Image: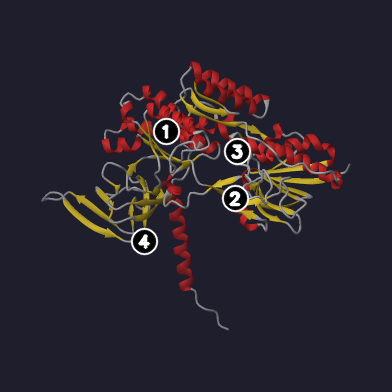
Amino acid sequence: MSENSKHRVVIVGGGFGGVFTAKHLRRLAGSGVHIELISRNNFFVFQPLLPEVAGGNIHPADAVSPLRLFLPGVCVRVADARKIDLLTKTVHVTVGRDREITAIPYDHLVIALGQVVDLSRTPGLADRALVMKDVVDAFQIRNQLLGCLEDADSTPDPRRRRRLLTFVVIGGGFTGVETLGEMQELLRKSLRYYPSVRPDEVRIVLIQHGSRILPELPEHLAAYASAALRRRGVEIMLSTGVKAVTNNGIETDGGLILDAETIVAAIGNAPSPLMRTVALPLDHGRIVVDRCLRVRGMDDVWALGDNAHIPLGDPNDTNTAYAPPLAQFAVREAKVLAGNIVASFDGRALATFEYRAVGAIASLGGRSGVADIRGVRVSGFFAWVAWRLLYLGFLPGLSTRIRVAVDWALDLFISRSIVEIRPARSTSRSLRLLRGDLVIEPGIEPAGVYVVISGSFERTTSAPGEQGASVHTCRLAPGECFGLSLDGTPPPVPEWVRACEDSMAYVIDKSDLKHLAMVSALVEKRGQAIVNKQPERA
């Protein structure tokens, strides 16, 4: 059969829903279907293992599986989906480092975009917080923890040590609790290599907006998890919201200020921005589908996973439950959806999606966990073992299972690596500061050039003179700068810069200054040329 005569199925999204749909479709459809998977990465991220990557328990490469290896017979296209055109039945993507725009035609479209992280509702959170969405995020958290230990071990300043050794996780769901548990385990096991850091100096805080953590689990298991974490020194703040995040830490809705260098946000899931550009029926940003996983009112567009609003009963019944955004549901949805696409080729009846969750399970780190599996509730060591066995069997591909099993076995006998790998990247960013926050002080080189965006700052300099030190104070308004000079040199005299009110500044990293200087020179030169240019005679 020629390629042109085959049914073309295009799957947008390389998460659980998209990858397992491609896998089942390849098995069910045979050679009569051309299957194309559009994914940002050439690998599949097994997200339940990301906290273990953050804790240094698993190598980052072992938490992912190569898509081309896992999906033989599927055309994998590493690209960003930019537009879905329902009229021309094409998906427009950008491909490669040159961002080439390509239109991919389809006969059937499967939308499995999942969700993105949106922290914009809390001022300053997006600029300061680390997130847990992919393997790069998890590896960054690991390096952040080790970097804080390195810096704290080297500084005698008690105020700076407190900030460096305070670690905050926002969000008490599965992701937040499991990430915090592995963070605590990595810190605990690493402290013996940092003799000047005492265990009682390390402060780990979990902030949960709700009245308890792990709301997906029965209350007594959530209570067990809280007690277990508290025994290990974790502070849990319940019924607490985050009002704002500043350069120095967190301000809660109760007015408490937490100075913290490390903030991890395990909240903020939101629909993909692509959904706002497509004329599809939506419910709170999720695509409305029928029980067969077809988009309502369409025969050739399907959706599943986190970006789909999937009824588990009659959608006209107000008491009908909907499929939760969980991996175990996405995998079962993929099997039903793949079967329904094949059935639609043959004109056969479509199957409805029906599934009852196996249960819920969470690892707390420290060889402890909580589980509710088909009504059987377990906590402690056996729940932790069950967690590992469950996900080991769930991992895609034998090679991935072997690598993860080896990582876990090695962790039982050898210490975790404390190698900190700092990526060479720009740290230019926005800073939100509260009144009185100190930005620059003697003894610490400024991070770059600070540009005042809003509010105001007070700069105090101290210069030696014949009559003793001469102190000068000035106020900096929006548009004015402080910190390093444009050539990257530090201030010639000691200076203190403090926010006079709640303010914002943008810090331009030292590595970006040479580019800024080059662009500024070109703009100035071009502007002068325009000024000097004489108008031509008509």
At which x and y percent is residue 393? 64, 25
Q: Which amino acid does label 2 sit on?
A: Ser
Is 81 drawn above or below residue 375 in the view shown? below
Disc on the earlier residue, 3 or 1: 1
* Residue for badge 3: 326
As measured in the structure, the alpha-carbon distance from the residue carrying label 3 to the one carrying label 2 is 17 Å
Q: Are marks 3 and 4 in contact (CB under 8 Å)?
A: no
Q: What residue type is labelled 1?
A: Leu
- The secondary structure type at the circle numbered 4 is loop
Protein image colouring = secondary structure
Nearer to us of marks 1 and 2 is 2
At which x and y percent is residue 232? 39, 26
Q: Closer to the camera, 464 or 329? A: 329
* Residue for badge 2: 272
Please state if 538 lies on the left or on the right of 338 as rendered.
left
Q: Are marks 4 and 1 in contact (CB under 8 Å)?
A: no
Q: Do the residues labelled 1 and 2 touch (CB within 8 Å)?
A: no
Q: Closer to the camera, 450 or 224? A: 224
As measured in the structure, the alpha-carbon distance from the residue carrying label 1 to the one carrying label 2 is 30 Å
Q: Closer to the camera, 38 or 258? A: 258
Mark number displayed over residue 462: none
Nearer to us of marks 3 and 1 is 3
* Residue for badge 4: 479
* Residue for badge 1: 145
Residue sitting at x 24%, y 47%: 494
Q: Is residue 401 visible?
A: yes
Nearer to us of marks 3 and 2 is 3
| Neighbour tally class for label 1: few under 14, some 14-19, many 20 plus, Cα within 10 Å | many
Q: Are marks 2 and 4 in contact (CB under 8 Å)?
A: no
